[in-house]
Image (cartoon, helix red, strand yellow):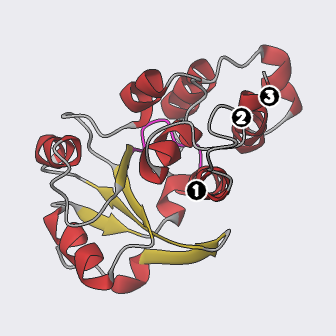
Amino acid sequence: NGAKMEDVVERHIDGRRFVAAVYEDLENAAELRAAVVAQAMPCDVAIADTSLVASWRHVLSAAANAARRSRNFSAVVVRSNEGLKTRTIHSDLIYSLSPATSIGDALRIFGVSDDSTAVVVAAFDPPEDAWARTLAMVRGRRRPPATLDAALTTAKTDAIYRAFKTSAAERAASSLEMTVLTRLATKDCL
């Protein structure tokens, strides 16, 4: 797909290696969704639809939340707000992008769907060869993560505000990104 490797982000977050790539003009969303559901991807991965992603920082914040909860995952904290909310760190990443407190709703809202045209493909600690094979499965145009920040149209902004159920006062008091990040930071406290 002619993409440059510099469009793949690698960060160390809370002791985990996080890698991600942003794709537009996705041609095989249904195939990718089926492979994720069947656990047939070369490595464990999260594929998130970006239609309601406010910014690249939104993705990084969700990754940090998922990594923190995976570190805290133990028999003692499984039933508390400290451990993973889902079965894997990758589904927890999708959960962490969403305002929903139900993993089913989070997957429906932010998980890849058959109709997705733009996605973030992300993984924690994948083997290099499996990550490369995962990226090779994606048929779309790889873009720098900053394209998420630049892709905010009025319609997308309004859709994000609706998804996060923001009030007019919140909209007036803060930026879209700060409103989303604040909602995500406090969602498990409610």
Q: Position of residue 77 (x, y in %)?
A: 69, 41
Identity of the residue drawn at 21% across and 34% down: 115
| Front residue of this view, candidates 132 and 166 | 132
Residue labelled with disc 3: 189
Tag 3–tag 2 contact (CB < 8 Å): yes
| Real-space Cα separation, disc 1 to disc 3, in angstroms | 18 Å
Work out whether 137 lies above or below 181. Answer: below
**Identity, as a three-letter code, of the amino acid under mark 1:** Ala
Q: Is residue 22 left or right of residue 171?
A: left
Q: Where is residue 73 in the image (x, y as percent from the top left)?
A: 62, 50
- Name the quarter where the C terminus is drawn: top right
Work out whether 190 lies above or below 93. Answer: above
**Identity, as a three-letter code, of the amino acid under mark 2:** Asn
First-in-chain label (1 vs 3):
1
Residue labelled with disc 2: 81
Work out whether 134 lies above or below 155. Answer: below
Answer few, some or many: residues within 10 Å of disc 1's Cα (few below 14, many 20 plus, some between 14 and 19): many
Quadrant position of residue 48? top left
Residue labelled with disc 1: 63
SS state under label 1: helix
The nearer-to-camera label among 3 and 2 is 2
Answer few, some or many: residues within 10 Å of disc 3's Cα (few below 14, many 20 plus, some between 14 and 19): few
**Residue furthest to the front:** 75
Dominant SS in magenta: loop
SS state under label 2: loop
Q: Is residue 188 magenta?
A: no
Give, as a single range, the part of the protein colored magenta.
Answer: 49-56
